[in-house]
Image (spheres, rainbow, N blue to C red):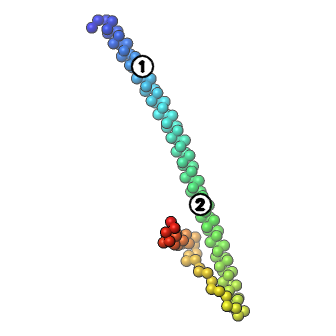
Amino acid sequence: MDGEAAERLMNIILQMKINLAHVTATLHQQTFEVQQQLGVIFEGEKKSLQDHVDGIYDKLKECSASLEDYKKRYAALATMREKLILLGAAPSPMPAALPADQVEGVIAWRLQELKSRGKI
């Protein structure tokens, strides 16, 4: 192999090395950009999930407040019914009482009711 052919071969190898370095740098840059984009998507989904959890928490607080209001109204209605009976009236029957006093029990009971009816 003469010197000129060796020089051309070395130039080709050098150009290949430069091209490979450029491809590698581009790949690293694109990988970094994809990681950044996925990080943004991840954080958005994470916030969305937290918003859902917060919404569930708010609904549970509302449910608990409604249960307390129900218990007060039920007790007041029972008292009113007893007074009507003492006054000689024949009031209609009381609505069914909730099967539990605690919000956890009421929610579990209601979920079971909805499942048995095919609603959930």
Q: Is there any visible trace of residue 27 in the rendered image? A: yes
Q: Secondary structure at mark 2?
A: helix
Question: In the figure, 82 relative to 13: above or below?
Answer: below
- Which residue appears at 66% of the width and 73% of the height? 69
Question: Would you call the spot at circle 1 few (<14 residues within 10 Å), some (14-19), or many (20 or more)?
Answer: few
Question: Which residue is situated farthest in the top direction here?
Answer: 3
**Amino acid type assigned to the residue bearing label 2 in the image:** Tyr
Q: Is there any visible trace of residue 104 in the rendered image? A: no
Question: In the figure, 114 relative to 21: above or below?
Answer: below
Q: Earlier in the sequence, mark 1 or mark 2?
A: 1
Estimate the spatial distance between the alpha carbons at disc 1 and disc 2, rounded to whole Å: 58 Å
Q: Position of residue 44 (x, y in %)?
A: 56, 46
Asked whether, in this view, residue 50 is left or right of residue 10, the answer is right
Residue 21 position by quadrant:
top left
- Which residue appears at 58% of the width and 60% of the height? 56
- The N terminus is located in which quarter? top left
Q: Which residue is mark 2?
A: 57
Question: In the figure, 15 relative to 40: above or below?
Answer: above
Residue 18, labelled with which disc?
1
Q: Position of residue 76 (x, y in %)?
A: 69, 80
